[in-house]
Amino acid sequence: MSTTKKNFIDVFPVAEHIDKTRAVFCNRDIRLDNINSVGFDMDYTLALYKQEALDALSVELTLERLIKHRNYPAEIASIKPEPEFAIRGLVIDKKLGNIIKLDSHRHVGKGYHGFKELTRNQRFDYRNVTIRLNTDERFALVDTLFALPEAFLYAALVDYLEEHPELDISFLQLYDDIRFAIDMAHRDGSIKVRIMADVEKYIIADPELAIVLHKIRSAQKKIFLMTNSYSAYTEKVMSFLFDGVLPDYPSWRNYFDVIITGAHKPGFFTKNKAFVEVNAEEEVLDENVTRFERGKIYQGGNVLDFEKFTGDKGESVCYIGDHIYGDIVRSKKTSAWRTVMIVQEMEAELNLAGELREELVRVQEFERELLRVNSELAFDKSLTESHRIRTDEEEIEHKAGRDRLKRHRKKLMIKLEDAENLFESKFNHYWGLIFKLGNENTLFGAQVEDYACLYTGRVSNFLYYSPNHYFRSPRQLMPHERF
């Protein structure tokens, strides 16, 4: 539903017949009329990046630092990004040099060693491995879009090391070297300097963002910005996104009641660092902050002081971010804030899913037929165990029927696997869908379901909902409740 340009500030679309790509999806009930304060992350939340351009920049600068600071051969500078290779939710096995995709039970469904796909037996080798994340030196989770280039580089350089064993670099050291190099590119400001020099090349301009924030403010809610980026970069990006879009807001700062940069999430939710006031050049103006003032920029801080200074806490605060751990899990576990996850990639997946509806129906038909055959075989087994078959002729006929069912099941399983692989490969040639692995949720999908109250593809999708909308989650059924 659209609005006219003349009234676009005061007349808003409503949540009727929303295209699925613009919908906000609900995991647990949330009444926005109970929310007093709405917070936003910046990177990959308000500011959506042009992923291919950012990947190319990250790969270029990381390779430069691997060559200069870790003595990797100069020829690796010729490695070019493969934008489709990495997706969020993958896990890097630093011991074996593998990248794997897990379902919600942490079973390995797909995997690659370099760019060579793991065999079924290689995947099955993980059945007796406990995959711990965030606490295990062996495994690393690819949980942000910023991390996609390092996953790609890890695969590319695993292949390179396999071809050059004389380098004597372990897969664990390789991971640490890549992390060192990409962290250096962020710490020395190289990546952000390049982005600030040509913001339009790397960041998507979305004029609907300003309307959404105006809409929230018009409902008498407070708005805050809380980003790990520091003030100089924040000033550049936010000016690009908001300055001059709406006449009532001459500066991006006018949209926000509180502005926090350099927040150091997830430490913001777990530590007790004090707030300081800074300017746009990151110079400290006041080290003794005891309250917030509109238009000023603060740095650091912690959730307890935030709630004390604003008067809002717990479920009266809703925070919108893209990082499943730093933005969503930590805020949910330590503060009881309500959470919204921005999953930028899902918009493209939803568009493609609509185009591939017939292929999905074909997969579902195979699944239903396989279920029917398995039921027949189970019934057949019960007949055998109950000794209801008595004559030799009955036994021969019974065995022939059972063998036919087994052959049919084997063919069905092959057809189902082929159909699933074909369907999923149209989303991503290497990994399939971001939220699904066969008929199971992926690890990433399970995390979004467990920790995000709401999730959507972009902040501007809230344009289609009232700031006081009552989101109700669909009834969640356990298997015994499904008929």
Image (tube, rainbow, N blue to C red):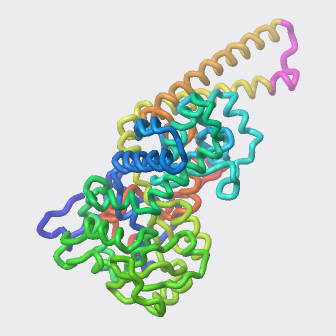
Q: Which residue is drawn at 41% across and 40% down?
A: 81
Residue 375 in view (yes/no): no
Q: In this view, does 308 lie above or below 340?
A: below
Vertical placement of 442 versus 7: above or below? above
Identity of the residue drawn at 52% across and 62% down = 452
Q: Does the magenta stretch include residue 379?
A: no
The single residue placed furthest to the left in the displayed view is 6
Magenta part of the chain: 382-392
Residue appearing at x 70%, y 54% in the figure: 136
Up-down relation of residue 127 to residue 194 (above or below):
above
Residue 229 placement: quadrant? bottom left
Above or below, 330 against 165 in this view is below
Would residue 179 appear left or right of 280 to someone viewing this image? right
Q: Where is residue 429 in the image (x, y as percent from the top left)?
A: 46, 33
Between 118 and 399, the one nearer to me in the picture = 118
Q: Is residue 383 magenta?
A: yes
Closer to the camera, 211 or 135?
135
| Image quadrant containing the N terminus | bottom left
Q: In which quarter of the image is residue 233?
A: bottom left
Residue 361 image point, x, y percent: 46, 33
Relative to residue 367, is residue 261 drawn left or right?
A: left
Residue 214: x, y in percent? Answer: 27, 75
